[in-house]
Image: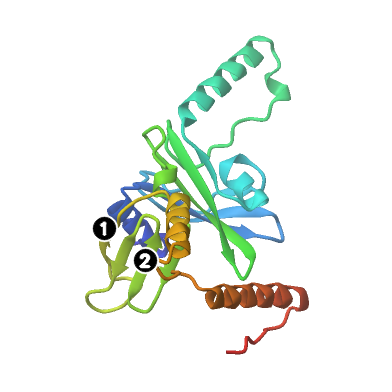
Amino acid sequence: MTPGDRLLRPGDGLARELLIEHSMLWMLETDRSVLSLVASHGYAVHRIGAELQVGVGLVGTAVREGVPIRIGHMSLSMVYGRAARGVIDELGLAQAVSAEIPLPGLPAPRSQLAVPLRARSRIVGALFVESLHDQYFGYDDEDAYHIAGTQGSLSVPTMRLKIFEGERSWWEPFTTSTESVERSDPLAGQVKHFAEVIRGEAEPICSGRDGLKTMQVVDAVVESARTGRPVNIAN
């Protein structure tokens, strides 16, 4: 096992838990504005040490903009690009176009996703995954919240529950399950509950006191961001 394999052991988890077979970990060298490939999973040739300029390609653009970028029909973009290059070659303008840079990856991917990695509000790199299937990385597999604790984690709204059944360790796999919940339109549910409260048929799930506490937390976050100092919230 190479150091890169150890570094991307989570890639094993991506393959096992999410069926994502091809992944790369890029780290940012801020002084040179360059991304370096430090680990990969699922490729015949790993090309550890390959470099990519920030702002170039899917990964470089995701890091520059600080947002995830997804392509569901990558093959169509590649076909268009190759057709355009063919016309350029026929016109004798090939020297005016920079050569394609050989980078690691699938020769004909159909879906790709690049996600910037942050530490203390700074982008430090990116996770890149790709697939041979169209629209493989869909909205249905995204979570709005991820609640992590000492024994495991729960993701919402996919309701994936991951827990350690044995020793807690970076190198031990989670036991993964999906909690069953009744799916419904949240806005319709709020209106229905509000009407029930007005009619005296139910107690508020979220009281006015709960709302006040929420606003206190929001105000403290804003004040902490403005001053750069911790803000204590009185009970």
Instruction: Work out whether 231 lies above or below 71.
Output: below
Labels 2, 1: front one: 1
Q: Residue furthest front?
A: 199
First in sequence: mark 2 vs mark 1: 2
* Residue at the image position 29 percent from the left and 71 percent from the top: 163
**Three-letter amino acid code of the residue under disc 2:** Leu
Instruction: Give how far apart the Cα atoms at labels 2 and 1 are.
Output: 12 Å
Q: Residue furthest right?
A: 227
* Residue at the image position 69 percent from the left and 13 percent from the top: 92
**Image quadrant occupied by the C terminus:** bottom right
Secondary structure state at the residue bearing disc 2: strand
Residue 5 seen: no
Q: From the image, tell me which residue sits under label 1.
A: 180
Instruction: Tell me the crowding category of disc 1: few under 14, some 14 to 19, or many 20 or more residues within 10 angstroms, Cα based.
Output: few
Instruction: Tell me the crowding category of disc 2: few under 14, some 14 to 19, or many 20 or more residues within 10 angstroms, Cα based.
Output: many
Mark carried by residue 154: 2
**Image quadrant occupied by the N terminus:** bottom left
